[in-house]
Amino acid sequence: QVQLVESGGGSVQAGGSLRLSCAASGRTFSSMGWFRQAPGKEREFVSAISGGGSLTTYADSVKGRFTISRDSALNTAFLQMNGLKAEDTAVYFCATTVLPITSARAMDVREYGYWGRGTQVTVSS
């Protein structure tokens, strides 16, 4: 049984930081990604990391503020979020894809097969 479980969400003030974790079980995953969905909006790509952790990609809106990483031994991905803004408020999901993250489709929510249930991040201004 494949499972992805996110944790680390919470409420912070603008400018603050949070570190999200995504623990995967059931199999070893290649590319892993983070997405977010704000109320009334579509789910959007945030960041992704390759299987070995050497390649990463980010949405323009989070570049320079968020850092994705992974611990392959723990089968866990992380999203360090610094300089949080009110517009970062959303439910954050982790997911996996068989695509290499160098593919343009790696930012497409439809390319991700397994999803966690999400963790809420609320940033107050």
Image (cartoon, grey):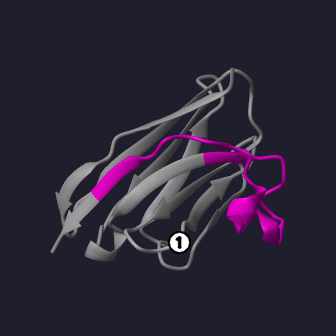
**Which residue is identified by label 1?**
42
* Residue drawn at (31%, 55%) of the image: 121
Query: Is label 1 in a helix, a strand or a loop?
Result: loop
Give the position of the C terminus as an image quadrant: bottom left
38 vs 103, nearest the viewer: 38
* Residue drawn at (48%, 78%) of the image: 61
Name which quarter of the figure residue 29 lies in.
Answer: top right
Q: Is residue 5 magenta?
A: no
User: Percent position (x, y) of residue 28?
Assistant: 74, 27
Give the position of the N terminus as an image quadrant: top right
Q: What residue type is labelled 1?
A: Glu
| Residue placed furthest toward the bottom | 60
Name which quarter of the figure residue 114 lies in.
Answer: top right
The region drawn magenta spans 95-121
Name which quarter of the figure residue 15 lies in.
Answer: bottom left
86 vs 115, nearest the viewer: 115
Q: Categorize mark 1 by other alpha carbons within 10 Å: few (<14), some (14-19), many (20+).
A: few
Q: In this view, does 54 lie to the left or right of 11?
A: right
User: Percent position (x, y) of residue 58?
Assistant: 59, 68
The vertical placement of 105 against 4, above or below, is below
* Residue drawn at (77%, 40%) of the image: 30
* Residue drawn at (45%, 62%) of the image: 66
User: Percent position (x, y) of residue 56?
Assistant: 67, 58
Number of disc labels: 1
User: Percent position (x, y) of residue 8?
Assistant: 34, 41
Q: In this view, does 22 lie to the left or right of 50?
A: left
